[in-house]
Image (spheres, grey):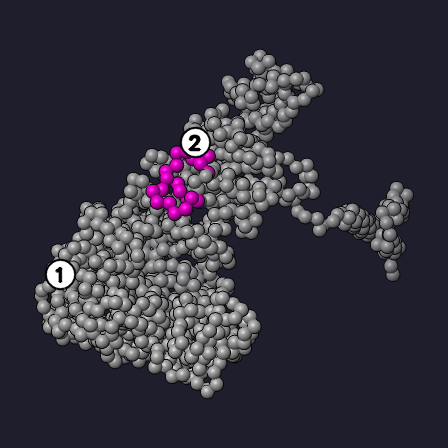
Amino acid sequence: MKFSVNWLHEFVDLPKNPEEIAKLLTRAGVETENIETRGAKIDKVIVSQITASSRHPNADRLTVCEVDDGSGTKRQIVCGATNYKAGDKIPLALPGAKLDNGIEIRKTNLRGVESEGMLCSPIELGLGEDASGLLILSAEAKIGAPLSDLFPGDTILDVEITPNRGDLLSHFGLTREIAALTGKKLKSTPREAKTDIKKSGLTISATRECPFFSARKIENVNVGPSPQWLRAKIESVGIRSINNIVDISNFVMLELGQPTHAFDADKLKGGINVRLARQDEEFLALDGKTYSLAPDNCVVADQERAVGIGGVMGGEETGVTNSTKNILLEAAYFLPASIRRTARNLNLPTDASYRFERGVDPEMVLRASQRATELIREIAGGTPATEINVAGKLPTNPADVSLSYEKCDRVVGISIKRRTVDEILEGFGLKQTKSERMRKNESSKWKIPSYRRDLQRDVDLIEEVVRAYGADKIPGTDRSRFTPASIADHAHDLESAWRQRLAAAGLDEVRTSKLLPRERFAFSKSAIELRNPLSEDHVALRPSILVGLLGVLDRNIRAGAERVAIFEIGRTFIRPSGKEERHLGILLWGNAASAPNWRSPQSRSLDLFDLKGALKCVVPNLSFRPGKFPDLALPVDVFSGDQMIGFGGQLSAAKFNAPGPVFVAEAHADLLLIAEETATKFHEIEKFPGATRDIAMIVPEEIPHETILHSIEEPREPLLESVELFDLFSGREIGAARKSLAYRLTYRDRSRTLTSEEVNAAHAKIRERLRRDLGAELRE
Amino acid sequence: MTHPLEQLRDDALCEIESAPDEQALETARVKYLGKSGSISSWSEQMRTLGKDEKPIVGKLLNEVRNAVTAALESRAANFRSQMESEGLARIDISLPGTPHEIGALHPLTQMWERSIEIFRRMGFALADGPDIEDEWHCFDALNTPPEHPARNEQDTFYLPDGRLLRTHTSTVQIRTMQAAPPPIRVIAPGAAYRRDELDATHSPQFHQIEGLYVDENVSVADLKGALEFFMRELFGTGTEVQFRPHYFPFTEPSLEIYVKSKALKGGERWIEVAGSGIVHPAVFEAVNKARGDDAYDPKKWTGYAFGLGMDRLAMILFDIPDIRLFAQNDLRFLRQFA
C-alpha cells in the first residue's frame, strides 16, 4: 500500500528523513519497498487561467489558448486537450520547466502558431496517473502562484503489509505503529462517534457473514468535483478521483482503514436487508460488469434487488452520480473469510475487500461513518440525519492473552527484562490486567486492542517483543546435534555418486521442467494433466524424462552443438495415481568428441555402445535385451541382473528430426536404490601370475557376442578367470555375412602358478566347444 | 713429492672433464683404462715392485683406477642425459593436453550439493516428501486454513482429483513430524510449484531447501546462529546477515533473511534469500491430531524452520541474470559451470 508521508505526519511526528521511517518500519517487519519523492519536479510551473481559446488554423486536433499567467501580458499556448473551458485554472509549465516525464519546455512553433509554454495534465507533473486531459485546478487557486504552493512536496512510501496486519492498511494505522516503535505520542485519534444510534430501518439475514451494518442518510448533497486538497491526497496514493462523495469514502478508507459506501438513496426501493445471494442472482456492479452470484456471496439488498456485493463493490444502478440528491452511507463489518471467498470466486479483488478480508477494526466502523459524514457535510453540503441506523452486533473484543516471561526468554533465546517486555506490549496498545496469581507465576495477562485480532497466543506477543526489541540484538548461538543418516541421505548419496560418474564419463547434467508443454507428448501420452494450467507451456506432469531431454537436444542442435551427451536424474509422475518415481534419462547425439583434437584426428559418432557404456557407469550387471517400443527404431530393454529397469535404443527418425541418430535410455532409478548399502570387502590380491590365451574366430554374422561368451563360459572351466572381447570386424576378406572376433582369456589359480600344459588343456576344451557348438572357424 | 700415479690420475681426470664429446671420452678411456692404457700398464709393473713398495702402490693404483672409472661414468652419464634432453627439447610443450570429455553438473545441482554439505556439517539429516500433495499438508496443517489470506489457491496448480503440486517444501516438515517424534533435525531439498507466468525472476517450477529443527528450548537465537553460519559458509566469511521480522502463517515469530556481501554483484545492497521462523504451535497441534498423540506438545517442544530458494541463491552466487536459463539447459550455459 502507498502512504503519503505528509498525511502520516498529521498524526505523529516522524523522523525527518523518509529513509529513516522506511528503515524503522522494515526492521520491525513492515517492509518499505519503495520511496518516491513527489512535487520536486514542478519548478517553473505556475497557476494560469485560460481566458479564451480558438481552433488551431492548421490542425484539427489542436487549439490555441490565450492564457493569463498573472504577469499582466497574456500568453499564447497551443494545446491538444479538450477537457477545459475558458475560465478554468490550469497548471502552466513555463519555458525552462522540466517535467516529470523528462520533457523540457521551450518556446516552440506548432504548425505555424507560436506556443509559449505548455498546459499540463496530472501525469506530466507526477501528480497522479491521469493522462486523459489537463489538470483543472480549483477556482480559488491564485493566478501566477507557483504550483508547488498547491502541491507541497511529498514522499510516497510503498509498504508491503503482511496479511496478518490489516490494522496497518490506513494512514492512521501505520502512524499508530510508528508511534509504538518510536515511543512518540499520537497527535490526534479519530473521535468516538457521538451520534444517536437507532436499531431500526435495517435488517441482516446473513448475520454470520455480516455481523454489523450501519447506514446514515444524508440529504441534499451537491455531488461534484472534489476540492483540490482532497483530490491531491487520494491521487497521491494512487486512487482516481471520481466525485466528491466517492472521493470522501475513499479518503476515509485511506485515513482510517474502514471502507464505506454511499448509495443514491432515491434509487433504493425500501429498507436495506443484508442477505445471502440467491443462486445465479445477477448483479450489475460499479465496474460495469454483471456478476452471477451464489448463495455464499453476501449482498446488501433493498426490498427488490441486490444493491451491493457486501464489502466488495456497490451496484451500478444505485451508485452516486452527478444528479444524486440524497445518499445513504454504509459502514459495516463483514466476516473476513466470507469476503475473501466472494472476492476470490468472483475474481473481484477491490480496495474494500482487501481490507475486509484482513479484518477491519470493529471500533472504527462508526467512527469512520462519522468522519465521512462530517466531510460530506463540509464539502458537499449535505444534511445528515441525526440518527444512524444500525443492525447486528460488532464482534466482541479479542480474548486476553497470557504470556510467561520465562517462555518469552526461551523462545527468543536471550533474557529480556520484564519491564522491557511490558513496555513494548504497552506501546503496541496492549493493556496488562492485574492479577496477583499471575505475577506469582511469573507471567502476565494482556488485554488485546480491538484492531489487533492477529494477537491470539503467547507466541504472537513474543513476536511483538522481537519486532520492537530488534532481531539484530539477538545474538546467534551454535546449537548442533548428532543426527543419524536417513533413507533420504542414502538415496541422495547414491544419486550424487551417479551424477559424478556420469559427468566423469563425459555427460552433461541437465534439469528440465517437470511440467510439460502441450505440444510435446512423445513418450507421454499418459501424462497427468493439470486442472488449471496457466499457459500451454506447462500443462501436464512428466511421466518420462526423455521428453525434456529431446527438448534440450532440439535447443542445442539449433544453437550449433555438434555433440549432445546429457543425462538427468529426477522425479516422474506415473498414472493413474501420480506415483512419483525417480528416473535416470540419458540422451546421446552427434560426435563422440566435442571438438576435433590433435591426438585422435579421426572423429566418430556416438552410438548405441556409448549409451550402454554410460549406463554401465551406474547400473550393476547391465545387459540389453531386444525390446519393443514403438517410438524406437532399435528398441532395447535395459536389465540389471535379471531385473528389467528401463528401456532405450535408437530413436525412430520419424519421431525426432535430427541430423544423425539419437540414442536414448530411461531407467527407473529407485529400483537400484533399494539395494542395501554394504561396505565392499577386501579380497586378497592375486599372488600367482595368470596366463592369457587369445582366440580369434570367424562366425556367421547373426551369432551374437553373448552366445559366444556363453559358449566360452559354460560349462565353467575352473581355471578361467575372465574373458574380454578385443577385436571385431567384418569385411570382404572374410566373406559375406560373416564376422571376425577376437577374445583374450585369462587363466589363473589362486593357490599356485599354472603350468603351460594345464592352461593349454583348458583352452583347448573351450576352443573345441566353440568349434562344435557354434561352428566357429578358429584362426591360429 | 707427487707420486707418478697421482700425476697420472690428475691428467686423466683433467682429460675426462674436458672431453668435448663421447668420442673424445672413449679415446680417454682407452688411453687410461684400455688393455694397453697407462693405468693397465701400471698393473703390469706391479709384479716388478719390491715387497715394501707393493702394498702402497697397489692401494694407490686402486684409488686411481676407481677415481678415473667414476669420472668416466659420470661424464658419460652427462653426455647421455644431455642427448636425451636435446632430443626432447624439440617437443612443443605448448601443445594442448590430451582432451577428456568431462561433463558439467547443473548449477542448481551444485547449489544443492553445496548447501547440503554445509547443513550436514551442522548435523542435519535429509528428509523427503512428494511433489504431489494434498491440501492438508500444503495448507491446513501449516496453519493456513481455507479463507486464510495467505492461502492462495489462485497460485496453486491442482490435479483433476483435487490434489495439488506443493507450493513450498514446508510440506515435508509435516510429513517428517508425522513419521517420527522429536527431536527432529532435517533439511529437505526439492521442487515446488507456483502458478506464475515464466519471466526472468519467476518460474512455475522452482527449487527449495526446507529446514526443520525441533527440540527442547529451540530459540530465535539458535535459528539466527544456524542461518548466519550457513550464509557465511556459502557466500564467504565477510557476508553480513540480517533478520527482519515478517509474516508466515506457520511460524511465529517469522523472520526474513537478507544478506549483503562485497563479493556479490550489487555489493552494498541487502538481498532477500530466505524465510524462517519459530514453528507455530498450531502446526504442532495439527501434527499431533494427525498422529493421534501428543508427541509434539507445544509446551515441551519448540522448533525453528526455514526455506531457502535454491534458484535465487544460485542466481546470486553464480551471478545468473535470468531464472529461465536453468530449465533451458543450453550447453554453452551448463559448460560454464564445469
Q: Amino acid at mark 2?
A: Ile
Residue B86 in view (yes/no): yes
Magenta highlight range? A520-540
Alpha-carbon neighbours of circle 2 within 10 Å: few (<14), some, or many (≥20)? many
State whether residue A138 is above or below residue A285: below
Q: Position of residue A730 (x, y in %)?
A: 65, 22
- Relative side of A739 to A37, left or right: right
Chief secondary structure of the magenta span? loop
Q: Residue furthest left?
A: A199
Name which quarter of the figure residue A407 lies in: bottom left
**Residue A271 — which label?**
1
Q: Chain of mark 1?
A: A
Query: Toward the viewer: B130 or A389?
Result: A389
**Residue A645 — which label?**
2
Q: Position of residue A702 (x, y in %)?
A: 57, 18
- Relative side of A467 to A281, left or right: right
Name the residue located 37 percent from the left edge and 36 percent from the top edge. A574
